Image (tube, coloured by chain):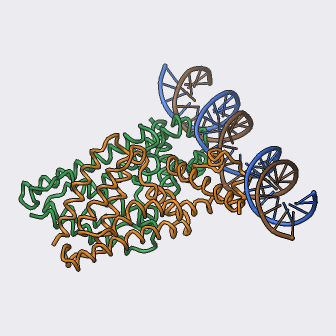
Chain colours: A green, B orange, C brown, D blue
Amino acid sequence: MQQELKSELTRQNILNESFKLFYENGFKTTSVDKIMKATKLTKGAFYHHYKNKKELGLAVISLKLEKRVCEGMILPLYKTGNALEILEDTFVERLKSFPVYDKQHGCPMNNFINEIGDLEIAYQMALRSIIEEWKTALINLIDRGKTEKTINESISSTAVAVYLISAFEGIRGIRKLYDNDAILDEYIVGLSLYLKQIKI
Amino acid sequence: MQQELKSELTRQNILNESFKLFYENGFKTTSVDKIMKATKLTKGAFYHHYKNKKELGLAVISLKLEKRVCEGMILPLYKTGNALEILEDTFVERLKSFPVYDKQHGCPMNNFINEIGDLEIAYQMALRSIIEEWKTALINLIDRGKTEKTINESISSTAVAVYLISAFEGIRGIRKLYDNDAILDEYIVGLSLYLKQIKI
DNA sequence: AGTAAAACATACCGACTAGTATTTTTTTGA
DNA sequence: TCAAAAAAATACTAGTCGGTATGTTTTACT
């Protein structure tokens, strides 16, 4: 039992350090050596717990990225209240709450998407499933807004969901190029304008 | 004179093959060796024409990326006609005209932004200048629409420009995860909806 | 206590990396 | 035609890469 715990802690250690290094320096250019140096363990430990670097990448996507997007962008959508306000709050609050570190390095998921989204089907599927989960949650919320007569019935929930996600991920990348939040503030004005359109 | 021409041709050769390989496999994981293998030249030729890989990266950004974005997304904005229609046409037509290759590998500029936008100030500045050029062209067009009374004066041109760019770059990345254009079509519906809002 | 298995460490492999030093080939201008 | 300069080729370095083989330590179970 103690062994299982230790094993799990080691896996979490590797996962945490991997996520951090992938986020800061990218997936392909972060070596197993660097990761294991960060964990204070050795390569032997890594290859005991993971088959190869690809398996680690998939684990980071499905365990770390998925969790992060879920907690930051999906779960807030299931709160009670005016659907449109929840939409605006979630996107705006998320952006405003990021520390400088997160603004400089962009969205970890978007980084993965752009770096290895076209590399292998396995990565594609793992990342796509997060996007689909996010998209579904948005559609559900927008549909709720429609039935509650706070959102215009004539607009396509799917289209709005996709456009919201696209713009959010896009600005997370572009913000990297700047050393202040002006571009984020402009995005927020653009977002608010967009949400006004779908109001009833 | 023939020497200058040869030199220029070699630089173009290196630039073209670099762009292609960076686009397909990323900047950091494309080695100088791979590039020079593609050019059918040797490493000696490379280091005769470029100081190092960083200088090549900056050249690709300012010569190849800038040109591509300019021709595909900026110059069309300066056409005559209804500003709003030009906006919609440019974004939609650009997306629709991409070959599968470009859909699979995303936007070359966005790839650079997400991979090395937070790596070094030199890259940041080079990429930012393209975004700024694009943003300025969009703002000019929107402002023209306002004076010509086809675009709502009360909306912020800057905010719309930023939101349009964000969403476009975002969807270019997300499309990588799919093997068909459904997500692009949904984006286009979302875009059209957005543009309706800024109509007078 | 003893043994098997799990967890981890050490040492190594061939392939690849950015960059340099040196030599050869080609072009230029007098 | 010939020497200087530019262009390109060759050979090399020290370090890094993902992965493997094998050794040692810790834990679990009887």
Q: How many marks?
A: 0
> How far across and how far down the image is residue B97, in percent?
34, 50
What is the quadrant of the C terminus of chain B in the image? bottom left
> How far across and how far down the image is residue B86, in percent?
27, 65
Q: Is residue B31 above or below residue A180?
A: above
Q: Is residue B55 left or right of residue B72?
A: right
Residue B197 position by quadrant: bottom left
Residue visible at 31% across and 60% down in the picture: B90
Residue A121 position by quadrant: top left
Q: Is residue A80 left or right of residue A43?
A: left
> How far across and how far down the image is residue B41, in percent?
69, 47
Q: Is residue A115 left or right of residue B39?
A: left
Depth check, front residue: C16 or C11: C16
What is the quadrant of the N terminus of chain B in the image? bottom right
Q: Is residue C10 above or below residue A187?
A: above
Residue C14 position by quadrant: top right
Residue visible at 19% across and 62% down in the picture: A86
Depth check, front residue: B127 or B87: B87
Residue visible at 20% across and 70% down in the picture: B198
> How far across and how far down the image is residue B167, in percent?
32, 60
Q: Is residue A48 left or right of residue B111?
A: right
Depth check, front residue: A141 or D10: D10
